Amino acid sequence: DDDDHRDDDEANETAPFPILPYDDAERRQHPGRIDIGTRNGETVAVEITGLSGIAITGPASDDIARALIGALLARAGPGAAEVLLTTDLAKRLLPDLDSDGTIRGAQSTDHMLRAIEAEMIARTRRLAAADAPDATSYRMAVPENPLPLLLAVLADVPDDSMGRWSALLASSPRLDIAVLFLAANRAATGQLVADANRSVTEVTPHPLAKQLTGAQLFGLRADEAVEVLGAVAAAHVTEESDTDDVESTQPITEAHPNPHVDEVHSPARAQIG
């Protein structure tokens, strides 16, 4: 009982993120600016694209990934962010979510890679048409047609696609496409190691190490993630009714039809099993 009580206290002290929205204009410009943990009693915030290419490893990596996904969707608001997982990883991380398109599944890592490459081409053209150097500038220039941040999370990278993933990682952040790995691999540009308590014990590269070493990252179990994502989706439904002046975003599978990318998981109709 004492252990359970301590766990509850720890969970309360490190609540993953607020469900209520931040300032609307700020979060529309920077949907990926999220709180990911605490260090020395202070909240640690990052741009999710600043973590792109990082491999999150250690016994709590799945819990950390769930919290990152939840924080992003809570922060971004309706239509401002999408998450792409392989179907196997979606079942592992978020086994009890139905679909409305916010969290999507690709049949394999290769299908995910092709979908992201196609999305990068489309976004590059949109930025060029608006004479915008990056996604943030594009949102400022074309506020009526927001560009959703895309977070891709995957566990394994086949050896024969390492080069393509490396090339993708070099140019995707300016397009607001972030890629996180849940296992060390040669395509990763850095590594974050966290222990069972989600305390960061090792980080590369150096700028992230200075910011994150010693931090305790937020984490969610699968059942907690389902509950949180359901609450986020319910809040977003209310918000959408008040934002009719903003065009709907183009989700990745509609912009680039692909039978291997499905709307397999979403927070809109969460089922707690």
Image (tube, helix red, strand yellow):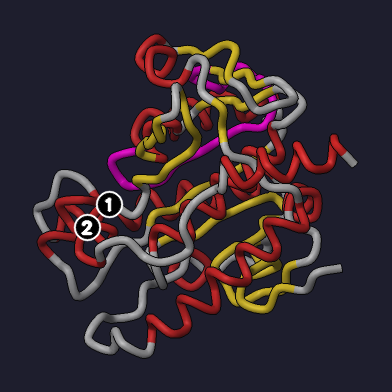
Q: Can residue 171 be seen here?
A: yes
Q: Reply above or below: 42 against 244.
A: above
Q: Which quadrant is the C terminus positioned in?
A: bottom right
Dividing the picture into quarters, in which one does residue 58 lie? top right
- What type is the residue that disc 1 sits on? His
* Helix, strand or loop under label 1: loop
Q: Nearer the viewer, residue 180 or 93?
A: 93
In the image, the segment drawn in magenta is 172-190
* Helix, strand or loop under label 2: helix
Residue ID at (62%, 47%): 12
Along the horizontal axis of the image, is 84 left or right of 62?
left
Q: Nearer the viewer, residue 234 or 120?
A: 234
Dividing the picture into quarters, in which one does residue 45 lie? top left
Q: Name the residue carrying label 2.
A: 26
Q: Reply above or below: 146 against 153.
A: below
Residue 153: x and y in percent read 60, 43
Q: Name the residue carrying label 1.
A: 30
Is 51 in the magenta? no
Residue ID at (64%, 41%): 219
Residue 201: x and y in percent read 60, 12
